[in-house]
Structure formats: C-alpha cells, structure tokens
Image (cartoon, rainbow, N blue to C red):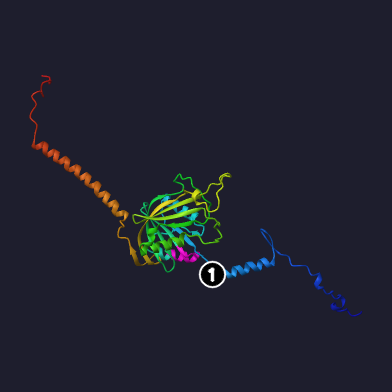
Amino acid sequence: MGKKRKHSESTAPAPEKKNDETAPERPKRTLLGWKDKSEDAEESKLSSSSSGFRNKEKVLVTCSRRISFRYRHLMLNMVSLLPHCKKDSKVEAKSSKGATLNELIELKGSSSCMFFECRKHKDLYLWMVKSPSGPSVKFLVNAVHTMEELKLTGNHLKGSRPLLTFSSNFDKDAHWKLLKEMLTQIFGIPKEHRKSKPYHDHVFVFSIVDEHIWFRNYQISVPHNEPDKIARGGLDKMTLVEVGPRFCLNPIKIFGGSFGGPTLYENPFYVSPNQIRALEKRNKAGKFAKKIKAKTRRKMHELSNPLEPDEFADMWKDE
C-alpha cells in the first residue's frame, strides 16, 4: 500500500483577502437607532470629563414589630416616594436594635436608615441615621395622615425626583443646619438613579413651626389645555396641589454616632407622651376626688342642719 499523504498537502492554500474586500464593521444597535463609532467616542469623552462626584445614596427603611396599621401605611408611603430606598423586614425594638440595624445597613449596601419605632401601640418614633459613623437623630412623630386617609386631589408620577424646599429659619441655629443637611441627603433622590424618572413634578416642603418640623408633599400642577398652553418659565400659572402624606417631627436628641453615642443636642421643650398621659390621668383622678368630697360635704351639711317636721306629713294616712 502506498503511504498516506499528509493533511497539509491535501488542503489547498487559502486565498489572501484583499483590503478592499473587507466588510465594514456593523455599527452598534441602540433603542433610538444605529450608533456610529464617532458618537461612541464623543460619549466616552463626555463621561470621562464629567466623572466627578456621583451620589450613591441608598436609604434602608424598616420598622419595629407590633407597629399599628396607620404608622405602617406611613412607612409604605415613604417607600413609594423614595425610589432609592430599600425596604427590609421588621426589627425587634430592644436595646440591641442599634447593632442589628447597623449590620442590616451594611448588608444592604446603604448609607442611611429610617427606622420607624412604635411603642405601646400609640407612640411613633423615627430614627434618621447616617451609618456607620453617624450622626443620628431621634424624632417623635405627631399629626400623621397617610395618602389613603386624606382625600387630596394631587397626584404625581411615581419615582420622579422632588424639589426640596426649606423654610428660612433652618439657618438660624447649628442643630437646625445639621437636620437640614440630613434631610437633604435622605430625601434627595440621586441624579440618574435607575429607579427614578428624570422629571421634577412635586415638591417636598420642610418648615419649622413651634420648634417642630412639618412635612408636606405638593404636586406641581401646570395648565395643559391647547388654547392655554403654558410657556417655559411661566411660574405665575403654576399651582401646588397637596398629595400627602403629612406629618410633624419633634426632634428629641441628636447623637454623634449611629443609633447612639455622645449627645450633641437635646431638646429642652420636649415632653414625652407618657408624662402627658400621666398628667391627664391625674386631672381625671382630681375631678373624681372633688366629686367625692362634694358628696361628703353635702351629707355632713344635711346632718348638721336637719329639716323641721312637716305638719301635713301624716294627713293622708289611713287610720
């Protein structure tokens, strides 16, 4: 038998490709059409030139166990208003809640936390915390009205970015300035967040009245009828319609750490709800004691001043 030829001998040499016959590279396909390499290079240049501070704020929102339905609805309203937040399961409100929540914040990759703590099924406390180094603020929440409860006509796009407005008295003291910065970082939605919409159609209003922070949410309403079409910058025709929720924050303490640490500020006008309820009980007990004293005085007066016998008392008796 003859020898087998090598494989290299059997295969014919491939013809060399000419430079003229090479097909042009296909451009990149996008949602808006085809994109050329030149546009890609321009975008990369713009991104490299604008690469500076990028807001990566993430807020963990959770609550304590045995929270009432109204306060739970308030927490869910805040979750729907803040697309950059992360919701977690309930946490037991004990002395060790700080360590548990700090660990949860780290696991979720968040930098801030809003913890709704309910006590005695009546009182709601709100913790706003910057983790892991602090500071943290403890508020008492009053005058709670949720979106489901109020019959308000306002409505805005879910996930849109709000405009934050603060009253001028936020700049009068150091602790109000600190609270303003914390509220700005927690309620300000990062630009170009993946769950947010690039629109500004509502306003978060924070105002200080009687040493309390009042929160309101308004929709920016613009007339859009065809004959009355508004021009750009026509602020005189824009109106605000309240959307909700609304609540009032009474600051109790500002701590230097996360869920504790040295006390930076303590509210001298704060009175706990337990003290208020105790005073109400004392007032009610005082009213009851006054009634008992009045009854005993009446009896003593009757005994000391007996009535004279009536001469007609036995007139109608049968003999």
Residue beneath disc 1: 52
Q: Nearer the viewer, residue 243 or 90?
A: 243
Residue 146 placed where, x, y %? 44, 49
Residue 267 placed where, x, y %? 32, 60
Where, by quadrant of the figure, is residue 52 drawn? bottom right
Magenta residue span: 100-112
Q: Residue furthest right?
A: 1
Residue at image coords 14%, 41%: 297
Q: Which secondary structure lies at badge 1?
A: loop
Question: Position of 108 compared to 93: left or right?
Answer: right
What type of secondary structure mainly makes up the magenta span?
A: helix
Residue 311 placed where, x, y %? 8, 24
Question: Position of 259 compared to 153: left or right?
Answer: left
Residue 111: in magenta span: yes
Residue 40: in magenta span: no
Residue at image coords 42%, 59%: 115
Q: Residue furthest top?
A: 319
Please state which amino acid type lies under the numbered disc 1.
Gly
Quarter of the image with the C terminus is top left
Residue 308 placed where, x, y %? 7, 30
Residue at image coords 27%, 49%: 280
Q: Nearer the viewer, residue 5 or 276?
A: 276
Above or below for 168 versus 22: above
Q: Nearer the viewer, residue 130 or 226?
A: 226
Characterize the local packing of mark 1: few (<14), some (14-19) or many (20 or more) Cα atoms within 10 angstroms.
few
Query: How many numbered marks are there?
Result: 1
Q: Residue furthest bottom?
A: 3
